[in-house]
Image: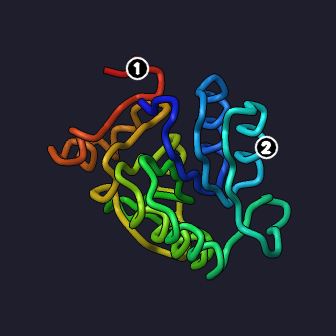
Amino acid sequence: MIPSRSSVSFGIGTTPEFVARAMLNHEDLTVITNNVNVAVTLSANPSNRIIMPGGVMRLPDLDFLGPHVEEMYRNYRVDFAVFGVGGIDPDGTFVDFDRPEVLVRAAMLQNCRTSILVADTSKFGRLAPARGGSLADPDMIVLNALPDVAVTPLLADSTIAAKLRLANEDSK
């Protein structure tokens, strides 16, 4: 899905971290991230270049948020942006736990050629107060499995269904 020699921005959370682990054998990546765990994981391959913001690290999440992080994402145009969300409302709206998470994600997605939402099925129906974006926004949606039947009508929408992939499917 993401080839070697790509530029990739990664957002916060554990699901983008799983993607980073799966990309350990990719060569010559330029990685832009505010997620310390992603940076450490992909730094295991010395051919990769890692770009991170400075500032105050958010604990225990091991990430950076704020206007300087938004600016970092605005300074780079990448091939792919891999991001997760805190939750997905029943109407398809993305929600997160803090407004800065939403603002940083928006800056990242405005500066990529292909956006990839990575999520596990527990995100569907999970509530959080900060909203921003929807299932209609990403170019690709990668899930660990198909969610429960209650969400099926949302994913059946033709524009959303065309973007949907399961993580264990082979790339086409």
Residue type at tag 2: Val
Q: Residue at x 31, y 62 (%)?
A: 91
| Position in image of residue 166 (x %, y %) | 41, 28
Q: Decide which of 48, 139 is in the foreground and name it.
A: 48
In the figure, 139 relative to 65: above or below?
above
Q: Residue at x 51, y 34 (%)?
A: 5
Colour scheme shown: rainbow
**Residue 93 placement (x, y as % from top left):** 37, 65
Give the class, few, some or many, for how many residues have Cα within 10 Å of label 2's Cα (few <14, many ≥20).
few
Q: CA distance from mark 1 to mark 2?
A: 27 Å
Q: In front: mark 1 or mark 2?
A: 2
Seen in the image, is 137 located left or right of residue 87? Answer: left
Q: Quadrant of the C terminus?
A: top left
Q: Return the disc, 1 or 2, that comes first in the chain's sequence.
A: 2
Q: Residue furthest left?
A: 158
| Residue drawn at the location 69% of the way across and 49% of the way down | 50
Could you tell me which secondary element the residue under label 2 belongs to? helix
- Residue 48 relative to residue 126: left or right: right
Report the front residue among 99 and 74: 74
Disc 1 is placed on an element classified as loop
Residue sitting at the far top: 170
Q: Give the residue at mark 2.
A: 40
Task: Measuring from the top left, give residue 71's x and y in whole percent.
Answer: 57, 76
Where residue 56 appears, as percent x and y from the top left, is 82, 74
Callout 1 crowding tier (Cα within 10 Å): few <14, some 14–19, many ≥20:
few
Q: Nearer the viewer, residue 125 or 25?
A: 25
**Residue linked to disc 1:** 169
Amino acid on which the number 1 mark rests in the picture? Glu
